[in-house]
Image: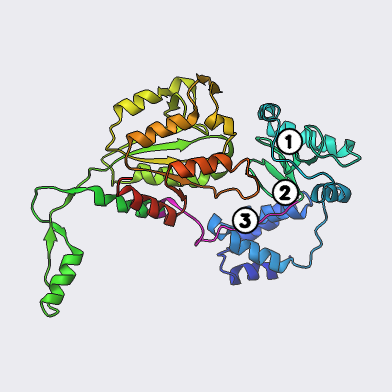
Amino acid sequence: MFSSFFYLLRARGLSVSFNEWMTLLEALQKNLHHCSFTEFYYVCRAILVKSESDFDRFDGAFLEYFKDMEFTKELPKQLLEWLENPKDKPKDTFDMQRAMQNNRLSPEEIQKMFLERLEEQKEEHNGGSYWVGTGGVSVFGNSGYSPKGIRVGGTSRYKSALQVAGERNFRDFRNDNTLDTRQFQMAFRYLRQFSSRIDAPKTELDVDGTIQATCDNGGNLKMIYQRPRKNTVKVLLLMDSGGSVEYYSRLCSALFQAVSKSNHFKDLKVYYFHNSIYAKMYTEPTLRTKLAVETDWILQNISSEYKVIIVGDAMMEPSELMGRSFFSYGVRDKTPGIEWFQKFKQKYPHIVWLNPAKRPQWSGYWSHTYDILSELFPMYYLSVDGLEEALKKLLVSR
């Protein structure tokens, strides 16, 4: 059965074994792909690909082999035309209170409602909260806002969709684009420059000194040793949890693991917040009230010698950052979030912001808080290069 596909995968660098291929044939025989070409793709990938770093290589081979397949649309053609070419241009402001009610819906409920709307809908709809359309706060459609839902057509804006309907978006996970814990750990080696030399015997090889001394010695090897460093680096990590930043959870998790496993720190303290810092922060990403810690306590008890790294996408409802009397996760706070951020900026001379998202170009509304916080803090894109630049910045005071 299409054995040439097996050989193409091997030729493209995927180490597909004969046993894995037989497992795929067995899965097809049991109709685990449900006679769907899309489901067939996922079954193939689940069985034949051993690492997500090979996803891109697999996708290339898959599309090369099945390039002549005609993909049938699972959504009504007229509906897709409405969504791609709406009569009314979507707005950037939404009924946020109404939108947040969608948080109560489970993925199963949203899927069921979506199928019901496809049966009911007979015309184009833009705005609102019920139909499949553009703008508005419905959990179906595109160019609107809902903390979770199904995107149909359009392009991703807030990275919060649970599912993308009518689209095959094979993601790029090449090794040269994948950031892993090891790469982050290597970047954290920059912080060793904060460490001080201790008064001990010279037992640590000085590579640069050895090279220079060998050159000065006419090429004859001359070993130079230096006193070892004492780990004096203290890091305070503040991480955004939940909401839009969930889209980047894998990337943020790799960073957290790198920080946790790093042996370049004398002390590491980690606290979590949601969107903006308020009167309380949390010791776990679940943000449970019983795990809350007074933010004032953190500011008073964690000394200014700590190097502070804030991780978050800096995008939120502007009132969350600038407004007063804000209520979040059971905590009511009359102090604007921006003032809490300013307190951290004033207390800690070494502070940077790592952002997994780039500045949104599609809406001045959602880039408002991003711009405010990027003006307040040195902000770097969360990549290996960005992390290295941020750590270099931590080497000097503001």
Among the two numbered marks 1 and 2 on one chain, the one whose residue lies closer to the N terminus:
2
Q: Which mark is residue 359?
A: none
The x, y position of residue 280, in whole percent, is 44, 24
**Tag 1 secondary structure:** loop
**Residue highlighted by disc 1:** 139
The x, y position of residue 78, in whole percent, is 88, 49
Looking at the rendering, the stretch of residues picked out in magenta corresponds to 167-183
Q: Are dots 1 and 3 in contact, CB under 8 Å?
A: no
Query: Looking at the rendering, which quadrant does residue 367 occupy?
Result: top right
Disc tally is 3
In this rendering, does residue 172 appear at all?
yes
Q: Residue furthest right?
A: 122
Among the two numbered marks 1 and 3 on one chain, the one whose residue lies closer to the N terminus:
1
The x, y position of residue 224, in whole percent, is 12, 65
Residue 137 in magenta stretch: no
The x, y position of residue 32, in whole percent, is 72, 49
Q: Is residue 252 above or below residue 7?
A: above
